[in-house]
Amino acid sequence: MKTLLIALLSILSYFELSAQQNIQTPISKINSVFKCHPNPVENELYILGVNKIKSVEFINVLGKRAAIYLFNKSIIKIDVSYLKTGIYILQVIDEYDKVEIKKLVVR
């Protein structure tokens, strides 16, 4: 619960700082769909969506889907302890069909 609270405070401060920045804020931060932590991850991955998240997909380095999860919420906790150690592409789609991908390292 403490970790979730820290994550919520982190995302709230992110939005506060973004609102205070001038017009030179990078487009990638404006259009961000989600934040995740920790990265690298061992057991539990926390995903915080700007909007509600529809799906989270883990794709391995060979391009094969390792896992897919369907949701309808903006704060997500996923147990990734079953994934093999390595690098994955984390693809998240929000309720408005915006897609964002990030590199995820699983230990």
Image (cartoon, rainbow, N blue to C red):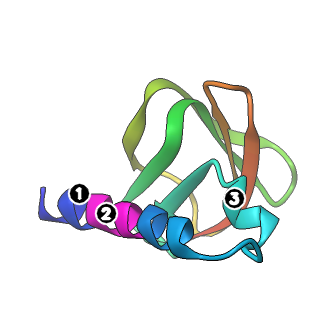
Can you give x and y, in whole percent of width and height, for residue 16 in the image?
42, 66
- Any mark on residue 7, and which? 2
- Any mark on residue 87, and which? none
- Work out how far the residue at label 2 is from the one at label 3, CA to CA, in angstroms: 19 Å
Picture layout, residue 22 above or below residue 82: below
The picture quadrant where one finds residue 102 is bottom right
Side (left or right) of 9 relative to 85:
left
- Pick whichever, 56 or 48, lies toward us: 48
Mark 2, Cα crowd under 10 Å, few <14 / some 14-19 / many 20+, is many
Mark 3, Cα crowd under 10 Å, few <14 / some 14-19 / many 20+, is few
- Any mark on residue 30, and which? 3
Q: Mark 3 against mark 1, which lies toward the viewer?
A: 3
Side (left or right) of 69 relative to 72:
right
- Pick whichever, 104 or 22, lies toward us: 22
Mark 2: which amino acid? Ala
| Range drawn in magenta | 7-13
- Any mark on residue 4, and which? 1
Was residue 99 drawn as part of the magenta stretch in this picture? Answer: no
Asked if disc 1 and disc 2 are in contact, CB closer than 8 Å, the reply is yes
